[in-house]
Amino acid sequence: MKKISIIVLVLFLAISCQKEETSGPVIEIPVGNLDLLESYELDVPEPSGLSFGPEKKTLLTVSDHTNQVYEMDLQGNIIRLMDYTGKDLEGVTYNPDNNLVVVAEEADREITFINYDSGIKLETYKIDISFGSDNSGLEGVSYNLNNKLYYIVNETNPDLMIIWDPLSGIISEEKLGFATDYSGIFTDVDHSLLWYVSDQSKTLYKCDYNSNVLLTFNLDELKYEGVVVDNDMVYLINDATAELNIYKIKNN
C-alpha cells in the first residue's frame, strides 16, 4: 500500500511539472494614454451608443430615455431628431451602403433598420440568443464596411460579440471575457480593428478582429456607452453625464 502511494505521488508531481512547463508566460497588455481635448454637454437625455454619420461629418446617438435617434455635429449640437421612436434603444450605427441607420433595442433583442433620409422605420429583426435579464441585452452595434456585416455586443449574461446580417442571421457568436460588461462597439475598417467600451470596467479596449485585446485605456468615469475612433481621435459618449468627450490617443 505504501509503495502504491509513493508511485501515485511521483506521477502527480510529474504531471504538475509538465503543466508548469507547457503553460506559457502571462502576457501583459499595454496601457495607452488619452488626452482630453474637448468635452461637450449634450441636449440628449441618457445618450447611449455612438456612430459616425455619412462621410464622418456628423454623429448619431440614441437616448434610452426618449427612445429616439439624434443626429449631431461633431461638437454635439443636435442637427435633427428622427421620427422613429423605439423601445429601450442602446446602440446605433450607420450603413452607408444602404443609407440606413441601424439601432439595437436591448430588452427585446432586436435590430431595427431606419431610412437615414426620412427617419422612418423599415424593418425589425430578432436576434435569437439566450439571455438573462431584460437589462443585460443588446448594447452596441457597428456596421463593418469591409465585409458588409454587423457586429453586435450583448452587454452581459452572456458576454457576446455577434456577427450578423439580415439575410443569413447570426453568422458567429464569440464569448468575451476581458471586461465586466460591454456597453459599446466600433469597427475601425481602416485599420481592421474592433474597439469596445465597458461601462463597469471604466475601460476602452483596442482589439483585433478576433477580439484579442491589443491595448487598453483607463477611463475616468462609469457609464461610457458609445465610442467611435478616427485615426488617433476617440469620441466617447457618457450616459450619466450626457457628455461627448473627445480624446487624442498619445500612444497607440
Image (cartoon, helix red, strand yellow):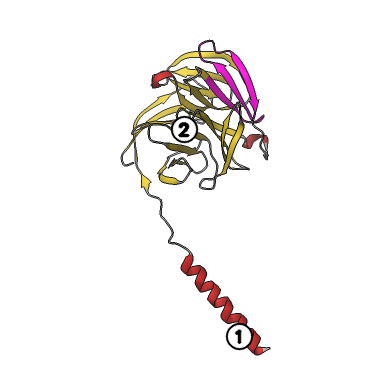
Q: With respect to residue 201, does 64 lie above or below?
A: above
* Spot occupied by residue 168 in the image (x, y as percentages of width and height): 61, 30
**What is the number of callouts on the image?**
2
> Which residue is the site of mark 1?
6
SS assignment for the magenta stretch, majority: strand
Q: Amino acid at mark 1?
A: Ile
SS at circle 2 = strand
The earlier-in-sequence mark between 2 and 1 is 1
Q: Residue at the spot x=57%, y=81% of the render?
A: 10
On the question of residue 224 being in view, the answer is: no
* Spot occupied by residue 79 in the image (x, y as percentages of width and height): 45, 13
> Which residue is the site of mark 2?
186
Residue range highlighted in magenta: 101-126
- Mark 2 and mark 1: span between their CA atoms? 57 Å
User: Which sits in the foreground, 66 or 21?
Assistant: 21
Query: Crowding at label 1, few (<14), some or many (≥20) Cα neighbours within 10 Å?
Result: few
